[in-house]
Amino acid sequence: MRFIDTQTLRDWLDALARQVTLIAPAPSNIGEAPGLVNPPAAGMYALYQPVGSADEIAWDFQRTAMSAREFLFPKTETLFTIETDASGKTTLHEPKVEQPQVIFGIRPCDARGMRVLDAIMLEQEPADAYYAQRRRNTTLVGLSCPEMWENCFCTSVGGAPNSSEDVDILLTQVEDGYAVQIVTEKGEKLAQGIQLQEVEGLALPEPKLNETFEMPTEQTWLDSFNDVYWDRVGERCLGCRACVYVCPTCRCFDVRDEKVVHPDGSGITRRVRSWDSCQGVNYRTVAGGANPRANPDQRSRNRFYCKFYYVPTDYDVPFGCVGCGRCIAVCPVNIDISEVLHDLAQRGKA
Amino acid sequence: MSKSSSNAIEGFEPKIVAFLCNWCSYAAADSAGVARIPSPPNVLPVRVMCSARVSAELILKAFMSGADGVIVLGCHIGDCHYDSGNHRTVKRIPLLRNLLIYMGVEPDRLRLRWVSAAESPQFAQVTTEFVKDVRPLGPLSAPLRMEGGAP
Amino acid sequence: MIEELGTKVRELLESETVECVIGYEVGPTGRVRPAFIHEPDEVGRLVFNTRCDHNLVTYLNRRNKPRKKGEEVPTTGILVKPCDARSLQVLLNENQVQRDKVYIIGVACPGMQNADGTLEARCARCSQRVPLLYDALFGTPPEVSDIADTYTDVEDMEALPREDRLAYWLGELDRCIRCYACRQACPGCFCDVCESERDDSLWIGISDAIPEKAFFHITRAFHLAGRCGECNACEMVCPMGIPLSLLNRKIVKEIEQTMGGYHAGVSEEPTPLITKLTGEEAINEIH
């Protein structure tokens, strides 16, 4: 079993930060607002951010408040710009993203989230070229979870806190350092810069697990679409969208053309895309003003169906949800995806 | 990130957006022009029917789009063409200004003054003074200025 | 108290005085959450404790129209704490809610607590423990001395040098993800299409640039001027922990100190920003 001691790891990260964009969990002051309805636990304040050295990493983090998807699919992204000069001549610029990035400390659930996004963005033609660029340039160095925390349910959706399936390298904390599993060729390439030791008989700790629960069957989802249960879930939804923005697999976006015109007639038009959310009241409003999801129960229902029925049906992944539990933690009115799954599984049996 | 008055850029001329109410200050600006009273060329006038029409959104959009200073000129209290529009203005603009100051914008960037239709020299004087006060502050930066202009 | 409350709610539902009652319940994982009671037999779900911080009045904004064309506007029962009642008064003043379509169940409030058991900051400075507006009142008002709001949180921010204030707000705005949770939770924000979200990007676009977020927060705080009941729902729901009360309370303080001690939601008087106050005729000098 390969092993790296803590200091060697930190030195390697310091050097890496000088060569690539190094993204890792870093401290934030999210927890400082007085009186949050459901304040996150102490280990849940970190945010994945570009860091300049190992010292900037929040080594004691449990789960970050936001997922890492913004590094493959940014909150706001300029797709292209068209510059017009004063004579009317236009030039098109397409941004090229070539800077390699390493996301260090990604939890297996967030890495699974990237696999789901890969399926959604890349599986079908035309693939999302913007996502593809960033994905090509990204290497994932995962960190096993020592235990499943409050709200975590990755094991119920086919994941595990120590899963190496979706990362390029997986580190598991052991005494004095980390056990290292090199998973992919990309991981092999990145690991060439690291001094790894071979340690005989290094036992990987078993993470403490939460109870796994039964998932509703496909037939249950089909049969429950018009159930009044969704009214009961949706009526307290504020439409605040927090669940979508913290989710590792949500990928809806809005596109706008934003044009700035200068007095001399020259100008610049940017086609911009930004994260959007199906939980917003006007998300599904179409030209003419009709809104097929005008009611909160319809919107809430859509979120669950998207994750557990539409995505698995349309793409080659078993679930559209990775069980990270962030949406449960952040929802101010306690709309709990694990409670819904449990309720639905019970309904299926009745 | 912050600009203090000692950081003034050489040759910088601030862009000022002036919201002028149709009945008083716009008329004053017009008369000042006719009478050839020198007024600073930095000022882009925007005519509104009453100073009470000037909402927070208009002022913020002006800042976002490139204004380094915004001045709102209305009728004197008691003289509003719509009786009491300026009563609202006199409460709203200082409130917005105090909020902007609270968030770190320099106090001199937003100003409210009364200028009546007969007061064209005062129009020139008020705008000249405003430009003089905004110039040392330099261009507006955070938190409102959009890189490359606002769409 | 909860038994009497339950009896009342059952009576309201059985007599069809209301179509549903909005209150609080405890979810399966122990978290308090809003509860919509539609059937008399469900009244056992209702609770009232020191973790009932949500302002339920925001739900009335979507119950003031019939669900289907041609139907009557439903009558709704709602549990209000004193701060919530202020938000409701504002909505009544603005004709967003009809008085005869809402049955107000007032509760005397002991003050809400944070997760760690400490009294919430907004409750520590509140001396109004009985709602000013109700059809029925439950609970015994606690003994509380007459506390005047001293706005120390706002004054501390005002006392900082300009560069520090700017750096602070830039940091907070940077963390904002424009999820609009604050707006959705606020009873005072009921526009069908928010200015910040227009499809034609009239004011701002959709990016997460700081100037656009600054526009949203400044405009929202300004639109709530003289209408904010200080329920703190906006701050409580923010997933990024942004201290929005610092913004709204700055405006509340300004209005109280310069516009005759006005507070939103304590009477039928609307915000002074839309009215003509006595004494304003004397204003001719501005700063």
Image: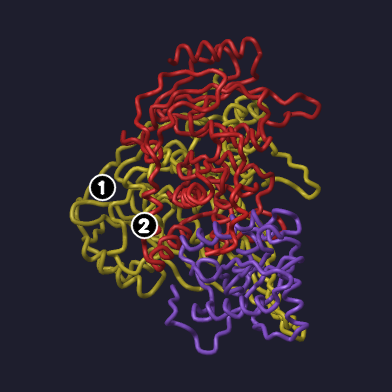
Quick one: SS at disc 1?
A: loop
- Expressed as whole percent of the image width and height from the top left, the position of residue C116 reads 31, 36
Q: Could you tell me which residue is drawn at 26 percent across and 55 percent down?
A: A179
Q: In the rendered structure, the residue with mark 1 lies on which chain?
A: A
Looking at the rendering, which quadrant does residue B110 occupy?
A: bottom right
Q: Is residue A260 left or right of residue A240?
A: right
- Expressed as whole percent of the image width and height from the top left, the position of residue A76 reads 57, 62
Colour applied to chain C = red
**Residues flagged by tags 2 and 1 on a common chain:** yes
- Judge whether A163 appears above or below C168 on screen: above
Amino acid type, mark 2: Pro
Of marks 2 and 1, which one's residue comes earlier in the chain?
2
User: Mark on residue C5?
Assistant: none
Where is mark 2, residue-wise? A25
Q: Residues within 10 Å of mark 1 (few under 14, many from 20)?
A: few
Q: Residues within 10 Å of mark 2 (few under 14, many from 20)?
A: many
Where is mark 1, residue-wise? A204
Q: Nearer the viewer, residue C5 or B124?
A: B124
Q: Is residue C93 left or right of residue C130?
A: right
Looking at the rendering, which quadrant does residue A152 occupy?
A: top left
Amino acid type, mark 1: Leu
Question: Mark 2 or 1, which is nearer the eye?
Answer: 2
* Residue C89 in view of the camera: yes
* Residue A335 in view of the camera: no
